[in-house]
Amino acid sequence: MKLLSFLFFSSMVAKSSQLTCQNDLRRPEYTDISVECGTSSISLAILVCPVVYTGYNESLLIINHMFNKPECAGTLDESVTPPVVRFTFPINMTNACGSTFVTTSAAGTGIFADFSNIQTVNVSGVVHSHDPTTGIVTYNAELKYYYSCAYPLEYLINNTQVDVSASSIAVRDNNGSFISTLSMELFSDANYTTPLVIPQLGLELRTNVYVQVQAANLTDQYHVLMDRCYASMSPRPTNSTFFNLFVSCSKDQMTTMHENGDSHHSRFSFPAFRFVEQQNQTVSTYYLHCITRLCEVSTCSDFKQCNNRRRRDVRSTGVSEATTLSSAVPIITRNENSASSSVSNSDSRMGLGIAVGVLTLAVIVVAAAAAVFYRRLGHF
Protein backbone atom coordinates (compact mmCIF):
# COMPACT_ATOMS: atom_id res chain seq x y z
CA MET A 1 0.00 0.00 0.00
CA LYS A 2 2.85 2.38 0.84
CA LEU A 3 4.50 1.52 -2.45
CA LEU A 4 1.25 2.27 -4.30
CA SER A 5 0.96 5.67 -2.56
CA PHE A 6 4.55 6.49 -3.43
CA LEU A 7 4.05 5.56 -7.08
CA PHE A 8 0.86 7.66 -7.25
CA PHE A 9 2.62 10.65 -5.68
CA SER A 10 5.57 10.22 -8.06
CA SER A 11 3.24 10.14 -11.04
CA MET A 12 1.60 13.43 -9.94
CA VAL A 13 4.95 15.16 -9.62
CA ALA A 14 6.12 13.77 -12.96
CA LYS A 15 2.92 14.97 -14.62
CA SER A 16 3.37 18.49 -13.22
CA SER A 17 6.99 18.51 -14.32
CA GLN A 18 6.11 17.54 -17.87
CA LEU A 19 3.28 20.03 -18.15
CA THR A 20 4.79 23.15 -16.61
CA CYS A 21 8.39 22.86 -15.50
CA GLN A 22 10.47 21.27 -18.23
CA ASN A 23 13.02 24.12 -18.27
CA ASP A 24 12.58 25.81 -14.86
CA LEU A 25 13.30 23.14 -12.28
CA ARG A 26 15.59 24.40 -9.47
CA ARG A 27 15.89 24.64 -5.71
CA PRO A 28 13.47 26.95 -3.87
CA GLU A 29 14.56 30.52 -3.05
CA TYR A 30 13.28 33.24 -0.76
CA THR A 31 12.12 35.28 -3.73
CA ASP A 32 9.78 32.56 -5.04
CA ILE A 33 6.71 34.21 -3.47
CA SER A 34 5.20 37.56 -4.44
CA VAL A 35 2.48 39.28 -2.41
CA GLU A 36 -0.10 41.79 -3.64
CA CYS A 37 -1.73 43.68 -0.78
CA GLY A 38 -5.00 44.83 -2.31
CA THR A 39 -7.70 47.01 -0.83
CA SER A 40 -10.22 44.20 -0.37
CA SER A 41 -8.14 41.03 -0.77
CA ILE A 42 -4.60 39.66 -0.62
CA SER A 43 -3.14 37.68 -3.50
CA LEU A 44 -0.14 35.36 -3.36
CA ALA A 45 1.81 33.93 -6.29
CA ILE A 46 4.35 31.14 -5.67
CA LEU A 47 6.64 29.81 -8.40
CA VAL A 48 5.57 26.21 -8.87
CA CYS A 49 8.70 24.82 -10.54
CA PRO A 50 10.85 24.86 -7.36
CA VAL A 51 7.90 23.22 -5.58
CA VAL A 52 7.88 20.41 -8.14
CA TYR A 53 11.68 20.14 -7.94
CA THR A 54 11.38 19.57 -4.16
CA GLY A 55 8.85 16.78 -4.64
CA TYR A 56 5.45 18.44 -4.38
CA ASN A 57 2.81 19.90 -6.67
CA GLU A 58 0.29 22.73 -6.37
CA SER A 59 -2.27 20.61 -4.53
CA LEU A 60 0.22 19.94 -1.74
CA LEU A 61 0.69 23.62 -0.88
CA ILE A 62 -1.64 24.50 2.01
CA ILE A 63 -2.29 27.97 3.42
CA ASN A 64 -2.47 28.25 7.22
CA HIS A 65 -3.40 24.56 7.61
CA MET A 66 -6.70 25.09 5.77
CA PHE A 67 -7.08 21.55 4.37
CA ASN A 68 -10.84 21.35 3.98
CA LYS A 69 -11.66 24.75 2.47
CA PRO A 70 -11.76 24.70 -1.33
CA GLU A 71 -11.88 28.52 -1.44
CA CYS A 72 -8.47 28.58 0.25
CA ALA A 73 -6.83 26.07 -2.10
CA GLY A 74 -4.15 27.21 -4.53
CA THR A 75 -4.76 27.19 -8.26
CA LEU A 76 -2.15 26.52 -10.93
CA ASP A 77 -1.65 29.34 -13.43
CA GLU A 78 0.24 28.20 -16.53
CA SER A 79 -0.63 31.32 -18.52
CA VAL A 80 2.48 33.06 -17.14
CA THR A 81 6.13 32.10 -17.48
CA PRO A 82 7.33 30.65 -15.23
CA PRO A 83 4.03 29.16 -13.95
CA VAL A 84 2.77 29.98 -10.45
CA VAL A 85 0.35 28.77 -7.80
CA ARG A 86 -2.08 31.50 -6.81
CA PHE A 87 -3.88 32.06 -3.52
CA THR A 88 -6.44 34.85 -3.08
CA PHE A 89 -8.48 35.57 0.02
CA PRO A 90 -10.51 38.54 1.35
CA ILE A 91 -9.31 40.86 4.09
CA ASN A 92 -11.86 39.77 6.64
CA MET A 93 -11.21 38.28 10.06
CA THR A 94 -13.95 35.70 9.60
CA ASN A 95 -12.89 34.52 6.14
CA ALA A 96 -9.20 35.20 5.52
CA CYS A 97 -8.07 31.57 5.19
CA GLY A 98 -6.60 31.50 8.67
CA SER A 99 -4.56 34.69 8.36
CA THR A 100 -3.56 36.48 11.55
CA PHE A 101 -4.69 40.08 12.14
CA VAL A 102 -2.61 42.20 14.51
CA THR A 103 -3.32 45.91 15.10
CA THR A 104 -0.53 48.08 16.48
CA SER A 105 -0.50 51.72 17.56
CA ALA A 106 2.27 54.30 17.44
CA ALA A 107 2.75 58.06 17.47
CA GLY A 108 2.10 59.66 14.11
CA THR A 109 4.87 60.88 11.83
CA GLY A 110 5.01 63.25 8.87
CA ILE A 111 1.66 64.85 8.17
CA PHE A 112 0.18 62.83 11.06
CA ALA A 113 2.89 63.88 13.53
CA ASP A 114 0.38 65.70 15.72
CA PHE A 115 -1.73 62.60 16.32
CA SER A 116 -0.63 60.47 19.24
CA ASN A 117 -2.32 57.24 18.16
CA ILE A 118 -1.90 56.08 14.56
CA GLN A 119 -2.94 52.47 13.97
CA THR A 120 -1.64 49.88 11.51
CA VAL A 121 -3.16 46.44 10.92
CA ASN A 122 -0.85 43.60 9.88
CA VAL A 123 -2.28 40.57 8.07
CA SER A 124 0.11 37.60 7.97
CA GLY A 125 0.30 33.86 7.53
CA VAL A 126 2.22 31.02 5.91
CA VAL A 127 1.83 28.64 2.98
CA HIS A 128 3.53 25.34 3.73
CA SER A 129 4.00 22.04 1.97
CA HIS A 130 2.09 18.95 2.97
CA ASP A 131 4.23 15.85 2.80
CA PRO A 132 2.12 12.75 1.98
CA THR A 133 4.89 10.40 3.10
CA THR A 134 3.55 7.94 5.69
CA GLY A 135 6.82 6.34 6.71
CA ILE A 136 9.21 7.19 9.53
CA VAL A 137 11.48 9.30 7.34
CA THR A 138 11.05 11.48 4.27
CA TYR A 139 13.42 12.79 1.62
CA ASN A 140 11.32 15.83 0.76
CA ALA A 141 12.34 19.19 2.21
CA GLU A 142 9.65 21.14 4.06
CA LEU A 143 8.59 24.33 2.26
CA LYS A 144 7.29 27.44 4.05
CA TYR A 145 6.31 30.68 2.34
CA TYR A 146 5.55 33.53 4.73
CA TYR A 147 3.46 36.53 3.72
CA SER A 148 2.60 39.78 5.45
CA CYS A 149 0.64 42.91 4.52
CA ALA A 150 0.67 46.07 6.65
CA TYR A 151 -2.19 48.54 6.18
CA PRO A 152 -2.05 52.02 7.73
CA LEU A 153 -5.42 53.15 9.04
CA GLU A 154 -4.96 56.92 8.70
CA TYR A 155 -5.24 58.80 5.40
CA LEU A 156 -5.40 62.30 3.97
CA ILE A 157 -8.20 62.78 1.44
CA ASN A 158 -8.32 65.84 -0.80
CA ASN A 159 -11.47 66.82 -2.66
CA THR A 160 -10.05 69.68 -4.70
CA GLN A 161 -11.71 72.01 -7.16
CA VAL A 162 -15.34 71.04 -6.94
CA ASP A 163 -17.24 73.49 -9.15
CA VAL A 164 -19.73 71.00 -10.58
CA SER A 165 -21.68 68.09 -9.16
CA ALA A 166 -19.74 65.77 -6.87
CA SER A 167 -16.88 64.81 -9.13
CA SER A 168 -15.42 61.37 -9.56
CA ILE A 169 -12.28 60.76 -7.58
CA ALA A 170 -9.08 59.87 -9.38
CA VAL A 171 -7.64 56.94 -7.46
CA ARG A 172 -4.15 55.50 -7.52
CA ASP A 173 -4.08 51.98 -6.07
CA ASN A 174 -1.39 51.88 -3.42
CA ASN A 175 0.00 48.53 -2.42
CA GLY A 176 -0.90 47.82 1.17
CA SER A 177 -3.40 50.67 1.45
CA PHE A 178 -7.16 51.02 1.85
CA ILE A 179 -7.10 54.49 0.30
CA SER A 180 -8.60 53.45 -3.02
CA THR A 181 -11.78 52.47 -1.18
CA LEU A 182 -12.17 56.02 0.20
CA SER A 183 -13.91 58.91 -1.53
CA MET A 184 -15.28 62.35 -0.70
CA GLU A 185 -18.53 63.75 -2.11
CA LEU A 186 -20.42 67.01 -1.67
CA PHE A 187 -24.21 67.23 -1.43
CA SER A 188 -26.80 70.00 -1.26
CA ASP A 189 -29.31 68.27 1.04
CA ALA A 190 -29.26 66.82 4.54
CA ASN A 191 -30.26 63.39 3.21
CA TYR A 192 -27.05 63.23 1.13
CA THR A 193 -28.93 62.29 -2.03
CA THR A 194 -28.53 65.38 -4.28
CA PRO A 195 -24.97 66.12 -5.45
CA LEU A 196 -23.91 69.72 -4.96
CA VAL A 197 -23.81 71.75 -8.18
CA ILE A 198 -21.78 74.95 -7.89
CA PRO A 199 -22.86 77.75 -10.28
CA GLN A 200 -20.31 79.45 -12.49
CA LEU A 201 -20.61 82.60 -10.40
CA GLY A 202 -20.20 80.60 -7.20
CA LEU A 203 -22.37 79.61 -4.25
CA GLU A 204 -24.12 82.26 -2.23
CA LEU A 205 -22.52 82.78 1.16
CA ARG A 206 -24.07 80.69 3.97
CA THR A 207 -25.31 78.04 1.52
CA ASN A 208 -25.14 74.70 3.38
CA VAL A 209 -22.51 72.30 2.01
CA TYR A 210 -22.89 68.65 3.06
CA VAL A 211 -19.71 66.55 2.99
CA GLN A 212 -19.49 62.76 3.02
CA VAL A 213 -16.36 60.61 3.28
CA GLN A 214 -17.22 57.02 2.40
CA ALA A 215 -15.44 53.67 2.22
CA ALA A 216 -16.57 51.25 -0.48
CA ASN A 217 -15.95 47.49 -0.54
CA LEU A 218 -14.46 47.64 2.96
CA THR A 219 -14.63 44.76 5.39
CA ASP A 220 -17.26 45.16 8.11
CA GLN A 221 -14.64 45.17 10.86
CA TYR A 222 -13.72 48.82 10.15
CA HIS A 223 -15.56 52.13 10.38
CA VAL A 224 -14.65 55.53 8.92
CA LEU A 225 -13.59 58.21 11.42
CA MET A 226 -12.57 61.72 10.36
CA ASP A 227 -9.83 63.26 12.53
CA ARG A 228 -9.57 66.64 10.83
CA CYS A 229 -11.16 68.49 7.91
CA TYR A 230 -10.08 71.88 6.69
CA ALA A 231 -10.25 74.25 3.72
CA SER A 232 -7.25 75.85 2.03
CA MET A 233 -6.79 78.46 -0.68
CA SER A 234 -4.46 76.10 -2.57
CA PRO A 235 -5.12 72.57 -3.83
CA ARG A 236 -1.89 71.62 -2.05
CA PRO A 237 -2.13 73.18 1.40
CA THR A 238 1.62 73.53 2.00
CA ASN A 239 2.37 77.18 2.77
CA SER A 240 -1.25 78.07 2.12
CA THR A 241 -3.84 79.89 4.20
CA PHE A 242 -6.29 77.37 5.62
CA PHE A 243 -9.33 77.23 7.89
CA ASN A 244 -10.10 74.30 10.22
CA LEU A 245 -13.68 73.09 9.98
CA PHE A 246 -12.94 70.68 12.82
CA VAL A 247 -9.90 69.15 14.51
CA SER A 248 -10.54 66.04 16.59
CA CYS A 249 -12.93 67.14 19.32
CA SER A 250 -12.68 70.84 18.55
CA LYS A 251 -14.85 72.24 15.75
CA ASP A 252 -15.81 75.59 14.34
CA GLN A 253 -19.12 76.84 15.73
CA MET A 254 -20.63 76.85 12.24
CA THR A 255 -19.67 73.21 11.51
CA THR A 256 -22.23 70.49 12.24
CA MET A 257 -21.19 66.84 12.69
CA HIS A 258 -23.86 64.41 11.53
CA GLU A 259 -22.06 61.06 11.77
CA ASN A 260 -18.49 60.05 12.51
CA GLY A 261 -16.98 56.66 13.32
CA ASP A 262 -20.29 54.77 13.35
CA SER A 263 -20.37 53.16 9.89
CA HIS A 264 -18.62 53.06 6.51
CA HIS A 265 -19.25 56.78 6.01
CA SER A 266 -18.77 59.99 7.98
CA ARG A 267 -20.76 63.16 7.41
CA PHE A 268 -20.68 66.83 8.36
CA SER A 269 -21.90 70.15 6.99
CA PHE A 270 -20.88 73.80 7.02
CA PRO A 271 -22.20 77.05 5.52
CA ALA A 272 -20.30 78.37 2.51
CA PHE A 273 -17.84 81.12 3.45
CA ARG A 274 -15.10 83.16 1.79
CA PHE A 275 -11.47 83.84 2.64
CA VAL A 276 -10.82 87.47 3.61
CA GLU A 277 -7.67 87.45 1.48
CA GLN A 278 -9.87 87.04 -1.60
CA GLN A 279 -12.11 90.03 -0.83
CA ASN A 280 -11.06 91.92 -3.96
CA GLN A 281 -11.96 89.00 -6.20
CA THR A 282 -15.37 88.33 -7.69
CA VAL A 283 -15.46 84.82 -6.21
CA SER A 284 -13.65 83.04 -3.39
CA THR A 285 -12.16 79.67 -4.31
CA TYR A 286 -10.97 77.07 -1.82
CA TYR A 287 -10.34 73.33 -1.46
CA LEU A 288 -11.39 70.70 1.07
CA HIS A 289 -9.07 68.18 2.78
CA CYS A 290 -9.92 65.49 5.34
CA ILE A 291 -7.57 63.35 7.43
CA THR A 292 -9.43 60.09 7.91
CA ARG A 293 -8.73 56.92 9.84
CA LEU A 294 -10.22 53.45 9.58
CA CYS A 295 -10.86 52.22 13.11
CA GLU A 296 -11.79 48.75 14.22
CA VAL A 297 -15.41 48.66 15.32
CA SER A 298 -14.41 47.68 18.86
CA THR A 299 -11.98 50.61 19.22
CA CYS A 300 -13.75 53.47 17.40
CA SER A 301 -15.30 54.71 20.63
CA ASP A 302 -11.82 55.08 22.14
CA PHE A 303 -10.76 57.50 19.41
CA LYS A 304 -13.85 59.64 20.01
CA GLN A 305 -12.69 60.37 23.55
CA CYS A 306 -10.93 63.71 23.52
CA ASN A 307 -8.55 62.90 26.34
CA ASN A 308 -6.99 60.12 24.23
CA ARG A 309 -6.29 62.34 21.24
CA ARG A 310 -3.76 65.07 20.94
CA ARG A 311 -4.93 68.36 19.47
CA ARG A 312 -3.40 69.25 16.14
CA ASP A 313 -1.45 72.45 15.65
CA VAL A 314 -3.49 74.69 13.33
CA ARG A 315 -0.31 75.78 11.56
CA SER A 316 0.76 72.29 10.57
CA THR A 317 0.26 71.65 6.83
CA GLY A 318 1.36 69.26 4.13
CA VAL A 319 0.20 66.52 1.80
CA SER A 320 1.27 62.91 1.63
CA GLU A 321 1.28 62.10 -2.08
CA ALA A 322 1.12 58.38 -1.40
CA THR A 323 -2.19 58.74 0.45
CA THR A 324 -4.00 61.49 -1.45
CA LEU A 325 -7.25 61.29 -3.39
CA SER A 326 -7.89 64.22 -5.70
CA SER A 327 -10.72 65.35 -7.91
CA ALA A 328 -10.37 67.92 -10.64
CA VAL A 329 -12.72 70.62 -9.61
CA PRO A 330 -12.91 74.24 -6.41
CA ILE A 331 -15.62 75.25 -4.04
CA ILE A 332 -16.51 78.71 -5.34
CA THR A 333 -18.47 81.27 -3.35
CA ARG A 334 -19.80 84.57 -4.58
CA ASN A 335 -18.11 87.62 -3.09
CA GLU A 336 -21.19 89.67 -2.18
CA ASN A 337 -19.11 92.67 -1.07
CA SER A 338 -17.48 92.94 -4.50
CA ALA A 339 -20.86 92.89 -6.20
CA SER A 340 -22.27 95.50 -3.82
CA SER A 341 -19.20 97.66 -4.34
CA SER A 342 -19.64 97.49 -8.10
CA VAL A 343 -23.26 98.51 -7.84
CA SER A 344 -22.40 101.35 -5.47
CA ASN A 345 -19.72 102.64 -7.82
CA SER A 346 -22.16 102.53 -10.73
CA ASP A 347 -24.75 104.41 -8.69
CA SER A 348 -22.18 107.02 -7.70
CA ARG A 349 -21.15 107.57 -11.30
CA MET A 350 -24.78 107.86 -12.36
CA GLY A 351 -25.50 110.38 -9.59
CA LEU A 352 -22.49 112.46 -10.57
CA GLY A 353 -23.61 112.50 -14.20
CA ILE A 354 -27.08 113.71 -13.26
CA ALA A 355 -25.63 116.45 -11.06
CA VAL A 356 -23.34 117.67 -13.86
CA GLY A 357 -26.26 117.69 -16.30
CA VAL A 358 -28.45 119.72 -13.97
CA LEU A 359 -25.64 122.21 -13.37
CA THR A 360 -25.05 122.62 -17.12
CA LEU A 361 -28.75 123.24 -17.70
CA ALA A 362 -28.79 125.87 -14.95
CA VAL A 363 -25.83 127.68 -16.53
CA ILE A 364 -27.58 127.71 -19.92
CA VAL A 365 -30.78 129.12 -18.39
CA VAL A 366 -28.87 131.85 -16.56
CA ALA A 367 -26.95 132.76 -19.76
CA ALA A 368 -30.19 132.99 -21.77
CA ALA A 369 -31.82 135.18 -19.15
CA ALA A 370 -28.81 137.49 -19.11
CA ALA A 371 -28.93 137.81 -22.92
CA VAL A 372 -32.64 138.74 -22.88
CA PHE A 373 -32.10 141.28 -20.15
CA TYR A 374 -29.19 142.81 -22.08
CA ARG A 375 -31.31 143.25 -25.23
CA ARG A 376 -34.07 144.94 -23.31
CA LEU A 377 -31.57 147.43 -21.87
CA GLY A 378 -30.41 148.20 -25.45
CA HIS A 379 -33.93 149.40 -26.42
CA PHE A 380 -33.83 151.95 -23.65
Image: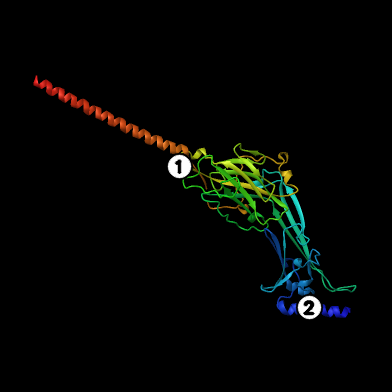
Residue name at image x 18 percent, y 24 percent: 370
Answer with left or right where residue 182 lies relative to residue 86. left
State the residue position of label 1.
282
Foreground: 62 or 216? 216
**Percent position (x, y) of residue 12?**
78, 78
In the rendering, which numbered label is found on residue 316? Answer: none
The disc labelled 2 sits on which kind of residue?
Met
Residue farthest along the top direction in this orientation: 380
Foreground: 71 or 102? 71
Answer with left or right where residue 135 lies relative to residue 56. right
Categorize mark 2 by other alpha carbons within 10 Å: few (<14), some (14-19), many (20+). some
Corner quadrant of residue 66: bottom right
Categorize mark 1 by other alpha carbons within 10 Å: few (<14), some (14-19), many (20+). some
The disc labelled 1 sits on which kind of residue?
Thr
Residue name at image x 12 percent, y 24 percent: 375
Compared with residue 79, is residue 278 higher up or lower down, i.e. above or below?
A: above
Residue name at image x 60 percent, y 53 percent: 325
Q: Quadrant of the N terminus?
A: bottom right
Compared with residue 251, is residue 58 higher up or lower down, i.e. above or below?
A: below
Nearer the observer: mark 2 or 1; the answer is 1
Compared with residue 343, is residue 152 higher up or lower down, i.e. above or below?
A: below
Disc 2 is placed on an element classified as helix
State the residue position of label 2.
12
Residue farthest along the right direction in this orientation: 136
Q: Are marks 2 and 1 in contact (CB under 8 Å)?
A: no
Query: Marks 2 and 1, Cα distance to the nearest angstrom?
Result: 77 Å
Disc 1 is placed on an element classified as loop
